Amino acid sequence: MEFEERVSALSSKVQKQREMTQTEEAAKNAFVMPFIATVLGYDVFDPREVVPEFTADVGVKKGEKVDYAIMLDSEVQMLIECKKANGELKVEHASQLYRYFSVTNARIAVLTNGVEYQFYTDLDAPNRMDSKPFMVLDLGDVDESLLPELRKLTKASFNLNSVVDAAEKLKYIGAIKRTLAEQFQEPDAEWVKFFASRVYDKAFTRRAREQFTPLVEEATAAFLDDQVNIRLKKALESTRPQPEAEPVTSEEAAEEDLERGTGIETTLEELEGYQVVKAIACSEVKPQRIAHRDSKSYFAILLDDNNRRPIARLHFNARSKKYLGTFDADKNETRHPLESIDEIYLHADKIREAVRHYLA
């Protein structure tokens, strides 16, 4: 499987089994070891790569252990400390990581309960673990924007310098995103006052705060819904009648190929169309399973990057018309003329059906 698919598979396992995983040892066996092995790509049974119960005496502290040390080229690269799966991760849980961080070569420390993974480094002071993580990966709800940075910590692509270089930016972006999420769910007084001051001319009294708190909460939720659905709403609200599908003759297909010439050029329109199809197909499968390949004849959108699993085709290179190709259960293609990219949403059911055929 591809890296993104391995993360997705472990995420599914976590979501199904987290309620049954009540102890620290259970979390290690069910989630953390598979994370080290399948996601990061290290051999958990090879002590040259993964050392369980890693011990390094720290001052007067003797015999203390960190759950796992990840080795590369005979050097400790990462330290991992585990807690029980349904327990909240707190900075107090990282005391051993703090001590071990300063006496090993590790630049990455991970605190985890098997579901959430908090990644730390030494941005604030050399060889001293930061008090706040630079990256937080939640396998219960994976933020796909973090996957490129996580990939840099895998055995196959280990790039410590690149991770550390990007850590400060990730730290602040992650903190801001988490703060926004908290405020959207339960806005505090300062957040409410910030918005109320822009629409309310009177003094911000206790009564005003009580009045505006639910309004801000409702408005932010509505804003998020609007952003997610804006493209779909445009298509659904369109009064333009849907053109009927047109059969494609071999002569027309040959003419299109001649118009394209011999080169392959992926256009912005094709990429935009791909994103629309991907957004539709994501109701059936994880987005990382939706891939694309460009060719002289068409822009293919595939499940699992497999030519035998076509989801749709974009025929955008002809001078005259643009078409969306959809597939039935027998993989027969029907082309639908498009006046705009948004009209792809009119064929959402056919796109989803194509995906479901491969999952049956």
Image (cartoon, rainbow, N blue to C red):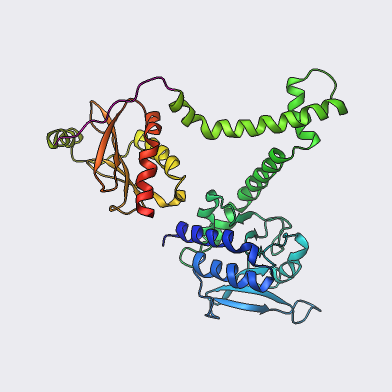
Q: Residue 126: give x, y in percent of width and height.
A: 69, 61
Position of 261 compared to 358: left or right? Answer: left
| Residue 247 on the magenta span | yes
Examine the image and state in which quarter residue 117 appears. bottom right
Q: Residue 354: give x, y in percent of width and height.
A: 34, 46
| Residue 345 on the magenta span | no
Q: Residue 303: give x, y in percent of width and height.
A: 36, 51
**Magenta: predominant secondary structure element?**
loop
Position of 335 compared to 123: left or right? Answer: left
Numbered disc total: 0
Q: Residue furthest left?
A: 251
Q: Quadrant of the N terminus?
A: bottom left
Q: Quadrant of the C terminus?
A: bottom left
Instruction: Please tell me which residue is depicted at 38% across the width and 31% down the height of the picture.
Output: 346
Q: Is residue 66 above or below residue 40?
A: below
Examine the image and state in which quarter residue 114 appears. bottom right
Instruction: Please tell me which residue is depicted at 86% across the width and 26% down the height of the picture.
Output: 207
Q: Residue 179: give x, y in percent of width and height.
A: 70, 43
Instruction: Please tell me which residue is depicted at 42% across the width and 60% down the height of the picture.
Output: 2
Q: Is residue 100 above or below residue 15?
A: below
Instruction: Please tell me which residue is depicted at 73% across the width and 79% down the height of the picture.
Output: 57
75 or 191, which is in the foreground?
191
Give the residues in magenta.
238-249
Examine the image and state in which quarter residue 13 appears. bottom right
Position of 227 compared to 175: left or right? Answer: left
Position of 276 compared to 142: left or right? Answer: left
